[in-house]
Image (cartoon, rainbow, N blue to C red):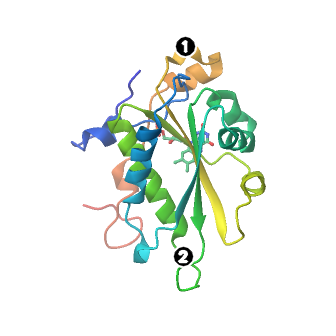
Amino acid sequence: MEKPADTRLNIHPVIKKRWSPRSFQSTPVKKETVQRLLEAARWAPSSFNEQPWRFMVGFKGDDTWQKIHDSMVEFNQQWAGNAPVLILAIGNKISSKGKTNNVYQYDVGQSMAYLTFQATEEGLATHQMGGFSKEKATEFFNIPEDHEPIALIAIGQQDKPEALSPDFEKMEKSPRTRKPLHELAFAGKFGEALP
Ligand SMILES: Cc1cc2nc3c(=O)[nH]c(=O)nc-3n(C[C@H](O)[C@H](O)[C@H](O)COP(=O)(O)O)c2cc1C
C-alpha cells in the first residue's frame, strides 16, 4: 500500500513517497543494502562536521536486533517484530573539542532522515520510533555516559495492512496529515504567516 503525501506543490518524489508503515515482511534485507543506507546517513551534514551519529545495527535473529526489540515499549513491540532490520541511533553529546554539542540530537535526526530517503529510493519501508527505554538500550549496549540513545528505526519490505492486528490495520489505513504551511512558516514576527 502506498500513501503518498498530498502535497500542495511538487516536491522530490522520494519525499512524497516515504511514509511510516507498521506492516513488515520478515524477508531479510541484504547487508550491502543496509550498508548503503548507513552510507547515506554518514553523508548527512552536521554542525562543525562533528558527525555525532552512531548506530547499533541489528538483523533479525542476532543479539543486537533482539536487544533493540527488547528496549521498545510494548506498543512498538506489537508491530515491529517482523522487521528484518532494527537500528538504534545514538548521539555523541560531546564535541571533538570536549565541549557540549548543542545540536547533536538535530544532527542525528538529520542523518536518520537521509537514511529514510535512501531506503525509500531502494524500495524499503522505514518506521522510526521514540517509544523505547533509553535506560535499557544504554545498559544492553554498554553505551558510554557521553552518548545518548536517540531513536530506533525499523527497516524492511512492506507487507499488506491486513497482516497487522485490526487496531494497527486501521492506523495503517488512516490518512496522513500535516499542519498547513501558514501555521509553520512565518515572517516579521513569530506566528505571522509568511505572505
Ligand atoms: C522521532 C520519531 C519518533 C517516533 N516514534 C514512534 C513510535 O514510538 N511508535 C510509532 O508507531 N511511530 C513512531 N513515529 C512515527 C510517526 O508517528 C510518523 O512519522 C508520523 O505520524 C508521520 O507519519 P509518516 O511518517 O507516515 O509521514 C515516530 C517518528 C519519529 C520521526
Q: Is residue 48 visible?
A: yes
Location of mark 2 (residue): 102
Mark 1: give few (<14), some (14-19) or many (20+) Cα within 10 Å. few
Q: Residue furthest top?
A: 162
* Image quarter where ligand 1 lies: top right
Disc ID at residue 162: 1
Please determine whether, in this image, residue 169 is positioned above or below residue 38.
Answer: above
Q: Residue furthest left?
A: 10
- Quarter-wise, where is residue 23 in the image? top right
Disc 2 is placed on an element classified as loop
Indicate left or right for 86 with 137 as reference.
left
Indicate left or right for 54 with 166 as reference.
left
Mark 2: give few (<14), some (14-19) or many (20+) Cα within 10 Å. few
Q: Position of residue 3 (x, y in %)?
A: 39, 28
- Quarter-wise, where is residue 186 in the image? bottom left
Question: What amino acid type should be assigned to the residue bearing mark 1?
Answer: Glu
Quadrant for the C terminus, please. Answer: bottom left
Question: What amino acid type should be assigned to the residue bearing mark 2?
Answer: Asn
Please determine whether, in this image, residue 117 is positioned above or below residue 81.
Answer: below
Q: Position of residue 184 (x, y in %)?
A: 39, 57
